[in-house]
Amino acid sequence: MKTPFRCAWCGDQVLPGDLQHALLPDYHYACALRATLGSIGHAQGTCSCYVKDGTAEDDPPGITRRQAAQLVADYVRQQQQPRSGRN
Ligand SMILES: [Zn+2]
Ligand SMILES: [Zn+2]
């Protein structure tokens, strides 16, 4: 891959070895998910697109953009886990 460059979402450097999204090479993997899916609230269906009380539209306060992206990536991973042997 190219030499380190700044992620188009969080602005942190994307370093060799960082996980990247195959279709969105300008981002960290997590940041690509955040940029395409929206905030963690949106991914979970609790943002104001779904909940009309105006809460939870944006990233949770007090964390970095990259941490907010990681929340979305973790959520997606949970959703994709096969539910084997457990109900
Ligand atoms: Zn990033
Ligand atoms: Zn939304």
Image (spheres, rainbow, N blue to C red):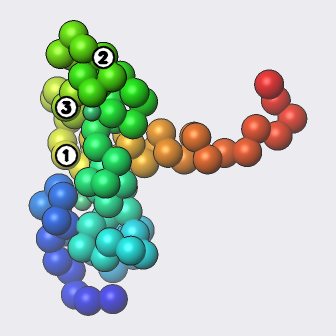
Q: Nearer the viewer, residue 35 or 19?
A: 35
As drawn, the residue found furthest toward the bottom would be 2
Residue 51 is marked as: 2
Identify the image quadrant of the C terminus: top right
Q: Nearer the viewer, residue 52 or 87?
A: 52
Q: Is residue 14 visible?
A: no
**Label 3 vs label 2: CA separation?**
12 Å
Whether the residue under disc 1 has CB within 8 Å of ligand 1:
yes
Percent x, y of residue 70:
36, 46
Is residue 14 left or right of 84 when viewed as pictured? left
Q: Amino acid at mark 3?
A: Asp
Image-quadrant location for residue 26: bottom left
Q: Which residue is mark 1?
A: 65
As drawn, the residue found furthest toward the top would be 53
Q: Secondary structure at mark 3?
A: loop
Residues at marks 2 and 1 touching, judged by CB atoms closer than 8 Å: no
Q: Secondary structure at mark 2?
A: loop
As drawn, the residue found furthest toward the right would be 85
Q: Residue at x 82, y 40 (%)?
A: 84
Q: Is residue 66 visible?
A: yes
Image-quadrant location for residue 78: top right
Q: Which residue is mark 3?
A: 58
Q: Amino acid at mark 1?
A: Arg
**Mark 2 closeness class: few <14, some 14–19, many ≥20 residues within 10 Å:** some
